[in-house]
Image (cartoon, rainbow, N blue to C red):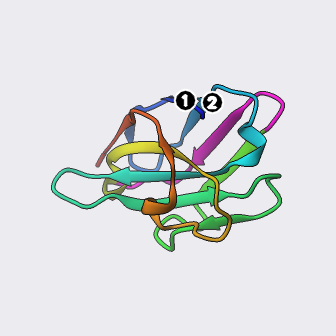
Amino acid sequence: QVQLVESGGGLVQAGGSLRLSCAASGRTFRTFVMGWFRQAPGKEREFVAAINYSGSNTYYADSVKGRFTISRDNTKNTVSLQMNSLKPEDTAVYYCAASYLLGYWSDYEKYDYWGQGTQLTVSS
């Protein structure tokens, strides 16, 4: 089992950058695929990015490709999301999630553990 705690959300102007972090408890962090999802008011939860166990493979939603970068540090049990060139449509609550399964990157139903979320607001 793992507990996830996100941090780093806030208010930023369009075109700006922000880095989200997710700290995981437990000694099995390296056995999880890690993902970031987001949910805007009135919308369904949306896949953002995911990374495999070692960090050698990453996967992004088309809407963030080239602007966001996911990374992980298995020595510190953390996964991060560097967000550049932010747009107002990136405004959402961002969730960190952990999955035992490899290959179901964007399927939120395949993620077993979730953080409480952190709010990102991008002003125009």
- The image quarter containing residue 59 is bottom right
* Left or right: 31, with 69 as reference point: right
Disc 1: which residue: 3
Q: Is disc 1 in contact with disc 2, using a CB cutoff of under 8 Å?
A: yes
The quadrant of the image that shows the N terminus is top right
Which stretch is magenta?
Answer: 74-87
Determine crowd level at label 1: few under 14, some 14-19, many 20+ residues with C-alpha closer than 10 A.
Answer: some
* Left or right: 6, with 26 as reference point: left
Please say whether residue 122 is one of the residues in the magenta stretch: no
- Measured from the top left, where is residue 99 in percent x and y? 59, 53
**45 or 81: nearer the viewer:** 45
Please determine whether, in this image, residue 119 is positioned above or below residue 39: above
Measured Cα–Cα span from mark 1 to mark 2: 6 Å
Instruction: Name the residue: 77% across, 53% down.
Output: 53
Disc 2: which residue: 24
Asked which secondary structure carries label 2, the reply is strand
* Left or right: 90, with 67 as reference point: left
**88 or 64: nearer the viewer:** 64
